[in-house]
Image: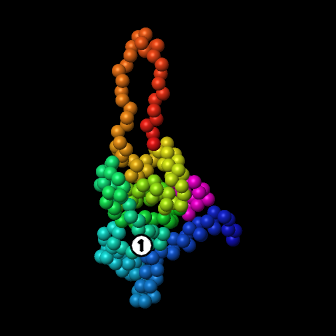
């Protein structure tokens, strides 16, 4: 039998998929209670349904962490130290990551999008600094990744995405001149309003 590299990669994915808390519980129920794997699956599913119905109340799975972030309901314009926090469960490691682990840029961007979306789904918002800490990189890298993803049509939900976060711009509109006045007036540079 010939085994090529794509078969080995799939075997590695399959081996990692087996190493979960649910699989451990299934094995313990089969061995300890002497029931079939099907019956053990019913027991595990029932335990999840009864004890871990609310998000964030269950034990963390492999690759997950609890992280404190800003509540999504906190309005824009507030200082971070004045904002209420919420605890969210984030998946730092996901089975999907193994499929693209050879491309580190793509992997970081996938994780960035996943973490921000998971926090949002649980009522929180991560800052760019949070994402930089979680992904072990610089904030400038996170900003570049967010811009690159935005160019692809992927919007990353972060605290910075909230409208009117900064003070109003000091740029004021001036009346538009027409005719010879407009042609003779020197153009003044337009101040940048991007952060």
Q: Nearer the viewer, residue 28 or 89?
A: 89
Q: Residue at x 46, y 13 (%)?
A: 184
Judging from the image, the colouring scheme is rainbow
Residue 89 image point, x, y percent: 40, 66
Residue 135 image point, x, y percent: 51, 60
Please indicate, yes or no, whether residue 121 appears anywhere in the rendered image: no
Q: Secondary structure at mark 1?
A: loop
Q: Which residue is mark 1?
A: 60
Q: Residue at x 37, y 19 (%)?
A: 176
Q: Which residues are magenta?
A: 98-110
Q: Is residue 41 above or below residue 144?
A: below
Residue with the most extreme right position: 2
Please indicate, yes or no, whether residue 70 appears anywhere in the rendered image: yes
Relative horizontal placement of residue 26, taking residue 49 as reference (left or right) = right
The reply to whether the magenta stretch includes residue 152 is no
Q: Is residue 176 above or below residue 146?
A: above
Q: Residue at x 34, y 78 (%)?
A: 47
Residue 1 image point, x, y percent: 69, 71
Q: Nearer the viewer, residue 125 or 154?
A: 125
Residue 11 image point, x, y percent: 59, 69
Relative horizontal placement of residue 71, taking residue 127 as reference (left or right) = left
Residue with the most extreme top position: 180
Q: Residue at x 39, y 47 (%)?
A: 161
**Mark 1 neighbour density, 10 Å: few (under 14) some (14–19) many (20 or more):** some
Q: Is residue 59 above or below residue 158?
A: below
The reply to whether the magenta stretch includes residue 100 is yes
Query: Which quarter of the rendering shows the C terminus?
Result: top left
């Amino acid at each position: 039998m010939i085994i090529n590299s794509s078969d080995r990669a799939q075997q590695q994915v399959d081996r990692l998929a087996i190493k979960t808390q649910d699989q451990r519980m299934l094995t313990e129920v089969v061995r300890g209670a002497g029931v079939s794997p099907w019956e053990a699956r019913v027991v595990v599913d029932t335990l999840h349904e009864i004890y871990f119905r609310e998000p964030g109340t269950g034990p963390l799975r492999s690759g997950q962490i609890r992280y404190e972030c800003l509540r999504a309901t906190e309005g824009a314009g507030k200082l971070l130290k004045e904002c209420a926090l919420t605890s969210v469960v984030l998946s730092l490691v996901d089975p999907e990551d193994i499929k693209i682990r050879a491309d580190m840029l793509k992997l970081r961007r996938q994780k960035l999008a996943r973490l921000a979306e998971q926090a949002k789904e649980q009522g929180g918002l991560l800052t760019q600094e949070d994402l930089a800490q979680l992904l072990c990189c610089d904030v400038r890298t996170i900003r570049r990744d967010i811009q690159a993803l935005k160019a692809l049509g992927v919007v990353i939900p972060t605290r910075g995405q909230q409208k009117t976060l900064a003070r109003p711009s000091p740029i004021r509109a001036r009346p538009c001149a027409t005719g010879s006045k407009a042609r003779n007036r020197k153009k003044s540079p337009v101040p940048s309003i991007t952060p």
